[in-house]
Image (tube, rainbow, N blue to C red):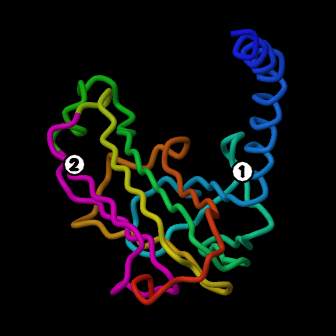
Amino acid sequence: MVVGSLCAFYMTLERPHLVSTVEAQLKTDLKENSAQLVVDDAQLRNGNLNWSMNRVDDQFVSRNFEQNKQKLEIKKSGFYSISSQITLRCVYANDDDDDVNCKQEKGEVSISILNNNNPEKALLKLFIIIKNFSRITQPASFSSSIRYLREGDQITAQLQTSQTIEYWQFDRAHSVLGLSWISDYPPDSTHQ
């Protein structure tokens, strides 16, 4: 019983220090091994999306990546957690119409997160169907996966819409792309 009490005392004494050390290490790992970007242009136009670090405080690109407007290049091979979220908001300027234009506009928005611009092997796909949404409703889509990426791979996002969409656009603060390095173990034949 004395040994058990001493172990409990030791754990209680050491735990706060251990927790703060683990938290600090996790924050360091996140900044060194991750990238998180926001959509740069709010307009819904077909083509490759531009990404930015300028509009939200928690956006960053670590040393494992090199970023330009449309591409995020992988600098370290390994398994990555890839996630993306898109959120839309109605931007109709005339308040007198009581969201009529927001509710009446219909369409589909899809985003494919691609590796080396290859649509055959999309890393992620996100879809939103715009139909009967009011200005206060923000349709959103989220997707994530774990994939093996090689040094030199270039990640892009391609936007497709079913038609011209006038009154809806990206909510830039909530439309993000994130990648986090998990492990550098080489892939076996099932991951290639």
From the image, which quarter does the C terminus lie in? bottom left
Q: Quadrant of residue 35?
A: bottom right
Asked if the stretch drawn in magenta spans residue 44, the answer is: no
> Is 184 located above or below residue 27 in the figure?
below
Identify the residue position indicated by label 1 in the image: 30
Q: Nearer the viewer, residue 120 or 108?
A: 120
| Other residues around mark 1 within 10 Å, as few (<14) / some (14–19) / many (≥20) | some
- Magenta run includes residue 123: yes
Q: Is residue 151 above or below residue 80?
A: below
Q: Callout 2: few (<14), some (14-19), or many (20+) C-alpha neighbours within 10 Å?
A: many
Which is closer to the viewer, label 1 or label 2?
A: 1
Q: In the structure shown, which secondary structural element does the residue marked by tag 1 occupy?
A: helix
The amino acid sitting under disc 1 is Leu
Q: Give SS at disc 2.
A: strand
Q: Pointer 2: what residue? A: 130
Three-letter code, disc 2: Ile
Residue range in magenta is 105-133
- Quarter the N terminus occupies: top right
Q: Which numbered disc, 1 or 2, marks the residue that appears first in the sequence? A: 1
List x then y, in percent, for residue 69: 65, 70
Seen at 75% across and 9% down, the residue is 2
83 or 20, which is in the foreground?
A: 20
Front-most of 57 and 134?
A: 57
Q: Do the residues labelled 1 and 2 touch (CB within 8 Å)?
A: no
Residue in front for this viewpoint, 183 or 69 = 183
